[in-house]
Image (tube, rainbow, N blue to C red):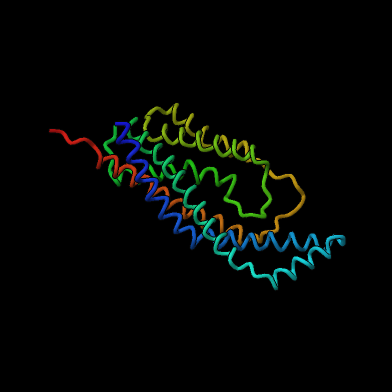
Amino acid sequence: MIRRLFSSAILAGVLAGLVISLLYQFTTVPLIVEAEEFETKQSADARYTTGTDKFVVHLVHNSDSKSDHPEWEPASVVERIVYTSLTTIISGVGFALLVVSALVIRGSSGGFRIGVLWGIGGFAAFILAPAAGLPPELPGMMKAELIGRQFWWLGTAIVTATGLWILVFYKNPYLYILATVLLLAPHVLGAPIQHSIQGSIIPAELAAKFSTVSIGVNFIFWLMLGGLSAHFFKKFQPKTA
C-alpha cells in the first residue's frame, strides 16, 4: 500500500508539475518579469532623486549601454525555469500525497473522475479560500509581514479543508453549522494587512491580471493533480486472483 501510495503521488506530481511549469512560462512568468521591470525602474528612480547617488546611477546607466553582459540573460531565464519547475514538481508531489492519502482514508479505489472532484476540493482549500484574503502577489507589491501571512494561509487551508470534508461526508446538521463556522472564520478574522503608507509600485491592472491568471493556472494544476493521482492509484491496485 505504501509503495502504491508514493508511486501514484510521485508520478502525478511530476507530470502535473512539468505541464504547469511549462504553462507558467507563457502565463504568469511574463507578468512577473514585467513587475520586476517596474520594481527595477522604481529603485533606480529613487536612487537618482536622492542627490548623493546621482553619479552611481549615471555609471550604472552607462555600463548597461556599453557592457557585453548578454550572456547572463539566458542563464537567468534558465535558472528561473529550473527553480519554477523544481518547486512546482515538489509541491505537486506533496499535494498528490494528500489526495491519495484522502482516498485511502475514504476507502476509495480511485479513478480519474473521482480524482478530479478531489482536485476541485484541494483547489478550494489551498488556493481559492486563501486567495480571498491573500491574493497572489507580484514583486513590488506591498505585503504584510511574512510570518503572519504564512500562518494565515496555513490556517485557512486547514480549516477550509476540514469544513469541506464535514460538508461532503457527514449528514449531521450540527456538524454543518461547525463546517460553516470553519469556512467563514479566517475571512471574518481577516488576513494580515500591510500597514505601510507607501503605495504599491505595481499598476493595479497588472496586479489583478496576475492574480486572475495565477488562480486559473492553479485550478488546472489541481484538476490534473487530483485526476492523475487517483488514476495512478487505481492503476496500481493489486490484481486479485
Name the residue located 30 percent from the left edge and 46 percent from the top edge.
113
Pick the quarter of the image with the N terminus: top left
176 or 35, nearer to the observer: 35
Pick the quarter of the image with the C terminus: top left
How far from the left and from the top, in percent, is residue 133?
Answer: 59, 44
How far from the left and from the top, in percent, is residue 225?
Answer: 38, 46
Horizontal side of 112 relative to 178 (left or right) equals left
176 or 198, nearer to the observer: 198
Horizontal side of 200 relative to 115 (left or right) equals right
Name the residue at the bottom extreme: 66
Can you say whether 36 is above or below 182 in the image? below
Horizontal side of 108 relative to 77 (left or right) equals left
Name the residue at the left extreme: 241
130 or 65, nearer to the observer: 65
Can you say whether 90 is above or below 175 in the image? below
How far from the left and from the top, in percent, is residue 20?
Answer: 43, 54
How far from the left and from the top, in percent, is residue 202?
Answer: 67, 59
Q: How many marks?
A: 0
Horizontal side of 172 relative to 38 (left or right) equals left
Name the residue located 68 percent from the left edge and 59 percent from the top edge.
39
Name the residue located 77 percent from the left edge and 63 percent from the top edge.
45
Q: Residue 167 is drawn in which quadrant?
A: top left
